[in-house]
Image (spheres, rainbow, N blue to C red):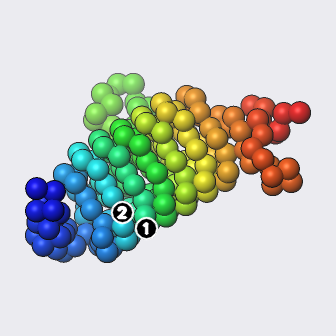
């Protein structure tokens, strides 16, 4: 049965997705993924997006160009929601657990006389998840970047950039460990990011 469904995917579903997306790389699979603004979404080679994900790339904040790019070899778990209104870039070999939310925008809420749903979407900074990073289950990243080979613990909320080779967790996420190239090991850090003694 699995071989039949895989054959159906590559004979029928894959060509249909390739026609809709800006780019769909070789041997990439999207399982029951909702797409909005597919013409602005680029997916590299050997990307696997598990069931019930939502990829959106819509210029709701006035940007003429909007892009969502997923690099080669990346895995995205079930029920992930990735919503770009300007720019979200996911690097190569990124591991994203289930129910992760990535967004470069927020709903406006500044006008206390209007319901939030009636207020305009506000553009935040671009989101860049760099090569080799790992985002744990239920992580939210809004208007921030996660560095190369960095780890973000489950249930964390990232609103400030996490540098390369760090372990971060919490809401808001703070750096707990970072790799020290001078000592060749991972070391605990203080809240300001400096190494503990």
The first of marks 1 and 2 along the sequence is: 2
Tag 2's secondary structure?
Answer: loop
Look at 82% across and 39% down and name the residue there.
194
**Image quadrant containing the N terminus:** bottom left
Q: Identify the image quadrant of the C terminus.
A: top right
136 relative to 50, above or below: above
Q: Is residue 135 left or right of residue 100?
A: right
Q: Can residue 145 be seen in this view?
A: no
Q: Where is residue 29 in the image (x, y as percent from the top left)?
A: 27, 62
Do labels 1 and 2 touch, CB within 8 Å? yes
Query: As drawn, is 133 to the left or to the right of 176?
Result: left
Q: Quadrant of the rendered structure where residue 122 is?
A: top left
Q: Which residue is drawn at 52% across and 55% down?
A: 129
x, y (%) of residue 140?
Answer: 45, 38
- 156 left or right, relative to 10: right
Q: Rate crowding at label 1 as few (under 14), some (14 to 19) or many (20 or more) other CA atoms within 10 Å.
A: many
- The circle drawn on residue 87 is none
Residue drawn at 43 percent across, 36 percent down: 137
Q: Mark 1 points at which residue?
A: 72
Residue closer to the observer: 144 or 147: 147
Left or right, 156 with respect to 105, comes to right
The Cα atoms of the two marked residues, 1 and 2, are separated by 6 Å
Which residue position is annotated with label 2?
A: 47
């Amino acid at each position: 049965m699995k071989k039949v469904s895989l054959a159906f995917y590559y004979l029928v579903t894959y060509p249909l997705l390739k026609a809709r997306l800006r780019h769909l790389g070789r041997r990439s699979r999207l399982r029951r993924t909702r797409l909005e603004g597919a013409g602005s979404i680029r997916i590299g080679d050997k990307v696997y997006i598990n069931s019930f994900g939502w990829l959106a790339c819509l210029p709701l904040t006035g940007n003429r160009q909007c892009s969502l790019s997923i690099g080669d070899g990346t895995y995205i778990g079930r029920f992930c929601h990735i919503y770009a209104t300007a720019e979200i870039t996911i690097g190569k070999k990124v591991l994203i657990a289930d129910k992760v939310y990535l967004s470069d925008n927020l709903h406006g809420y500044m006008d206390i006389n209007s319901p939030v749903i009636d207020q305009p979407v506000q553009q935040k900074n671009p989101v860049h998840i760099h090569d080799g990073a790992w985002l744990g289950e239920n992580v939210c990243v809004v208007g921030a970047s996660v560095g190369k080979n960095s780890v973000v613990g489950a249930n964390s909320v990232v609103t400030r950039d996490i540098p390369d080779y760090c372990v971060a967790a919490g809401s808001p996420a703070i750096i707990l460990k970072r790799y020290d190239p001078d000592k060749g090991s991972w070391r605990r850090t203080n809240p300001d990011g400096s190494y503990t003694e």
